[in-house]
Amino acid sequence: MEFIDYYKVLGIDKSATADAIKKAYRKLARKYHPDLNPNDKEAELNFKKVNEANEVLSDPEKRKKYDQYGKDWQHAEEFEKAKRASSQGRSRSSSGYTYSHAGGSEQDFSDFFESMFGGASGFGGRGQKVHFRGEDYHAKLQLSLMDVYTTQKQTLTVNGKNIRLTIPAGIEDEQTIKIKGHGGPGIQGGPAGDLYITFSITNNTAFKRDGADLYKAVQIPLTKAVLGGEILVETLTGKVKLKVAPGTNNGTKVKLKGKGFPKYKKEGVFGDLFLTYTVDIPKNLTEEQKSLFEALEKTNLA
């Protein structure tokens, strides 16, 4: 993985205090925030780098590992284990137990430790080569609700590689999927890490989503509520005609089976659409309309 100087990203030096890091982060996060830079890919990339830098440098333990190990800071524990194994091996060298590289010559600790960063071939305890798994990558993909109403394919570019991704219909907001082997490359021949993609689903519709079910408030005229009749209701796939029963109360709920959202990884299976009727009370009545309501009131039916 390409080395990113987090200090340079935030515009601070290595002696920066926690307050200085926080201040620099807030300033740059505002500057590159997607809401202030719509459709600006460079600003979006810088925003991600700033967040990544802050996540590491604002955490004392992560910062310590980063300062010591650079881009391989996430493998600090493995390096420390290798270091301890090397020290133990050197203490047993008098009994003929040493560490060797491919050429078979004895290797002191500095050479051994250097190999952990991709130099000469490294070996662990009892002459076994040490392999380190590559780091996991994390990405966020923003889509609209209607984008995930149907299954779609997208091509993502991660670390210079194009990855063709199938996004199943019905995926949830903040749901994370794993793509095995598409993370950082392994160290010393170890396996590659994985790619984790978290989905951010923006709902710009009039429907509230809860899993595969949808909810919506529908306003009906007072006359329809009293006398009954037909109304047209919007769904995600178009308008449907519904019958309103005479004497329908405010807050009445109606379920439209199968008119909700696709169920994740269940082809052709949908949730339900729940409608809540709100009766529209007329305002600014004409004198004639008021007279009609007054006459109705006198019949003791109102």
Image (cartoon, helix red, strand yellow):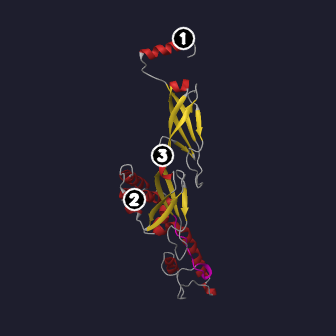
Residue drawn 52% across the image and 35% down it: 217
> Residue 119 or 38: which is nearer the viewer?
38
* Closer to us: 86 or 228: 228
In 3D space, how far apart are the residues under numbered discs 1 and 2 (Cα atoms)? Answer: 70 Å
Which residue type does callout 3 highlight? Answer: Asn
- Above or below, comparing residue 217 to residue 60 in the picture: above
The CA span between labels 3 and 1 is 48 Å
User: x%, y% of residue 209?
Assistant: 54, 44
Q: Residues within 10 Å of mark 3 (few under 14, many from 20)?
A: some
Please identify the quarter of the rendering in which residue 131 is found. bottom right
Segment colored magenta: 124-136
**Residue closest to the eye, 72 or 290:** 290
Which mark is first along the chain, 2 or 3? 2
User: In terms of sequence position, does the residue under pointer 1 or pointer 2 come before the other?
Assistant: 2
Q: Amino acid at mark 1?
A: Lys
| Quarter of the C terminus within the rendering | top right
Q: Look at 64% across and 86% down and name the residue there.
A: 95
Q: Position of residue 28 (x, y in %)?
A: 37, 54
Q: Residue 134 lies in magenta, yes or no?
A: yes
Asked if residue 206 shows in the view, the reply is: yes
Prevailing secondary structure of the magenta residues = loop
The dot on residue 45 is 2
Q: Secondary structure at mark 3?
A: loop
Q: Nearer the viewer, mark 3 or mark 1?
A: 1
Provide the residue designation for mark 1. Answer: 298
Q: Which residue is mark 3?
A: 203
Residue 13 in picture, x, y percent from top left = 38, 62
Of circles 3 and 2, the one toward us is 3
**If you read the primary sequence from the N terminus, does the residue marked by circle 3 or circle 1 appear first?**
3
> Quadrant of the rendered structure where residue 252 is?
top right
Residue 19 part of the magenta segment? no
